[in-house]
Image (cartoon, rainbow, N blue to C red):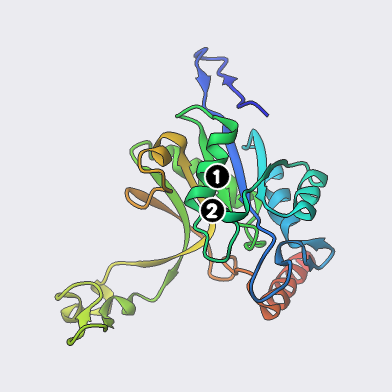
């Protein structure tokens, strides 16, 4: 599928296309074939694909996988498919080459936007995607956006080991500051990452600096790694359906 160009009626200037990329390899630890395991009445992968489609802000949704069953399911749920090379689908395979392969295959323009959506985050909704993209567009000087949840800032006073002496995680002055004076601390939840193609190609990597956060709750940030995680997600979804 070729990149889409959407012309602005007001300016006549082509707007950047927005592509959702869902990396969903066949192998997994903890749960066999995790990405297609049922979560209530749908496979896990479907929650992310449905959210991307329902957002209305994505021009095309792609699934990258080495697994034919996952690719067939992606097609069923309306996604474009990219057959991933097996060397990019190992347990220790980083995401950067997967994104690079995606860009090499579809050849988007440099200003086009990639929204990376992990299928192990089923509680991330269309609303989250819409809000995150709006925040990203509000900060044109940033290189990317990542979704996060807030954690206790007391960890800024933590020490790290490994050498002969302990070292303060956040620098020598953190231990002297009152908790109220410590800055907020955020943990990435891997649900959403947004960046331009040019910003990826600068270092052939997902940007890790000049990032802005999209804040989600700790509950919404649940990632599926174990059977217990599935039970927690199902309980949350049932509760949401009753409200």
Circles 2, 1 touching at the beta carbon (< 8 Å): yes
Residue 167 seen anywhere in this rendered image of the structure = yes
For the C terminus, the image quarter is: bottom right
Residue beneath disc 2: 192
* Quadrant in the picture for residue 36: bottom right
Q: Is mark 1 on a helix, strand or loop?
A: strand
**Label 2 to label 1: alpha-carbon separation:** 7 Å
- Residue 181 x/y as whole percent: 24, 72
The percent position of residue 204, horizontal first and vertical second, equals 41, 43
Question: Measuring 55% from the left and 42% from the top, which residue is drawn there?
Answer: 101
The reply to whether residue 55 is in sight is no
Q: In which quarter of the image is residue 90?
A: bottom right
Q: Is mark 2 on a helix, strand or loop?
A: strand
Quadrant occupied by the N terminus: top right
Q: Where is residue 14 in the image (x, y as percent from the top left)?
A: 52, 18
198 to 89, vertically: above or below: above
Left or right side of 240 for 133? left
Give the x, y percent position of residue 219. 58, 71
- Left or right: 195 as drawn, with respect to 79: left
What residue lies at 64% left-to-right and 63% top-to-bottom?
120
Q: Which residue does the numbered mark 1 point to in the structure image? A: 115
Mark 2: give few (<14), some (14-19) or many (20+) Cα within 10 Å.
Answer: many
Q: Looking at this rendering, what residue extends furthest in the top direction?
A: 12
Which badge, 2 or 1, is on the more N-terminal residue?
Answer: 1
């Amino acid at each position: 599928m070729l990149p889409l160009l959407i012309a602005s009626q007001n300016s006549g200037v082509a707007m950047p296309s927005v592509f959702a990329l869902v990396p969903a390899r066949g192998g997994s630890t903890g749960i066999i074939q995790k990405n297609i395991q049922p979560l209530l009445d749908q496979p896990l992968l479907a929650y992310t694909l449905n959210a991307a489609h329902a957002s209305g802000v994505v021009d095309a949704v792609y699934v990258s996988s080495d697994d034919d069953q996952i690719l067939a399911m992606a097609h069923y749920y309306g996604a474009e498919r990219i057959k991933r090379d097996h060397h990019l689908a190992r347990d220790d395979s980083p995401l950067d080459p997967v994104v690079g392969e995606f860009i090499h295959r579809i050849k988007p323009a440099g200003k086009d936007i990639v929204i990376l959506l992990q299928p192990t985050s089923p509680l991330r909704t269309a609303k989250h995607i819409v809000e995150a993209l709006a925040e990203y567009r509000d900060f044109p000087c940033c290189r990317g956006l990542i979704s996060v949840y807030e954690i206790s800032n007391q960890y800024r006073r933590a020490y790290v080991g490994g050498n002969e002496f302990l070292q303060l995680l956040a620098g020598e002055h953190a231990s002297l500051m009152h908790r109220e004076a410590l800055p907020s601390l955020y943990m990435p939840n891997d649900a959403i990452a947004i960046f331009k193609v040019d910003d990826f190609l600068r270092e052939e990597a997902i940007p890790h600096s000049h990032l802005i956060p999209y804040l989600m709750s700790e509950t919404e940030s649940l990632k599926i790694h174990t059977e217990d995680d599935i039970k927690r997600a199902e309980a949350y979804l049932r509760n949401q359906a009753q409200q």
